[in-house]
Image (spheres, rainbow, N blue to C red):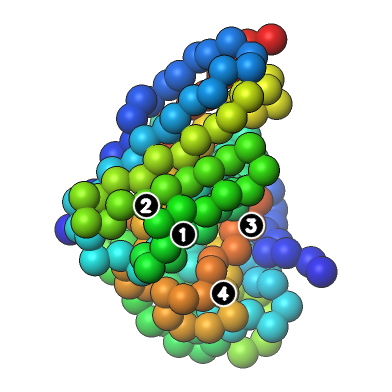
Amino acid sequence: NAGVMQNPRHLVRRRGQEARLRCSPVKGHSHVYWYRQLPEEGLKFMVYLQKENIIDESGMPKERFSAEFPKEGPSILRIQQVVRGDSAAYFCASSPGRGSSYEQYFGPGTRLTVT
Amino acid sequence: KQEVTQIPAALSVPEGENLVLNCSFTDSAIYNLQWFRQDPGKGLTSLLLIQSSQREQTSGRLNASLDKSSGRSTLYIAASQPGDSATYLCAVRANNDMRFGAGTRLTVKP
């Protein structure tokens, strides 16, 4: 059984470029969550998506960040015009259903470095 | 707004010691609480999940307790080993998201 897969594992971007982070959930899971971990801090919730729908984006920065989870393919977290403050580890989690009774399974993360 | 605090921020112990990591949360209306382990530069490994109706969970040398009314959880590690060295994260689930503490960085010296 493949767990949550994220790629790339490491991503280096120059200021002003775009970053695309991909997350493939556990097979059969239709719910995806994105979290960001800044250096020396805990994980912070960003967005919760179900196939083709954004359910909760209360943790997403208002500008430059967007997320999608299409009917086919992985979930994508897109960061436009990256700045140094975007350097962090971005984790994706998936669950088989909606609601807090379903455990979230975490991927290995993508470490973004903005130079 | 739910706030999760972990104390201490860092802990260093000699091999073989029993130890306790603490987690507190401000809003007792949670569905579950989960303890994770994170190694440097790595992802999260789930250790124990406690549902709000439960008081504790055990796995091997690990025991986690939950006192929802007081907003506290503890992770007890028995007979610590150098391989236990990692950052331990506590997270509570209330709605769509999980709220994480900043973690306790544990070092077990041989």
Left or right relative to A34: residue B44: right
Amino acid beneath label 2 = Leu
Task: Give coordinates of residue A95: x percent, y percent.
Answer: 56, 74
Mark 1 in CB contact with mark 2 (< 8 angstroms): yes
- Subunit bearing disc 1: B
What residue sits right under mark 4 in the picture? A95
Q: Which residue is drawn at 35% across and 76% down?
A: A56
- Same chain for labels 1 and 3? Say yes or no: no
N-terminal-most mark, 3 or 4? 4
Give residue A17's position: percent from left, percent from top.
51, 51
**Amino acid at circle 3:** Gly
Q: Tag 3, which secondary structure? A: loop
Between label 1 and label 3, give the one nearer the viewer: 1
User: In which quadrant of the rendered image does the C terminus of chain B lie?
Assistant: top right
| Residue at the disc numbered 3 | A107
Circle 1 is placed at which residue position? Answer: B50
Mark 1 and mark 3: Cα distance apart in space: 21 Å
- Mark 3–mark 4 distance (CA, rounded to whole Å): 12 Å
At label 4, which amino acid type do we have? Ser
> Of helix, strand and loop, which one carries label 2?
strand
Asked whether residue A28 appears in the rendered view, the answer is: yes
**Residue drawn where x is 38% and y is 26% of the image:** B9
Nearest to N terminus: mark 1 or mark 2: 1
Query: In this rendering, which labeled residue sits more in front, label 4 or label 1?
Result: 1
Q: Judge whether residue A41 can be spotted in this image.
A: no
Alpha carbon distance from label 2 to label 3: 26 Å
Q: Which of marks 2 and 4 is in front?
A: 2
Which residue is identified by label 2?
B66
Question: Which mark lies nearer to you, 3 or 4?
Answer: 4
**Residue depicted at x 46% and y 76%:** A101
- Give the Cα separation between the discs numbered 4 and 1: 17 Å
The chain containing the residue under callout 2 comes to: B
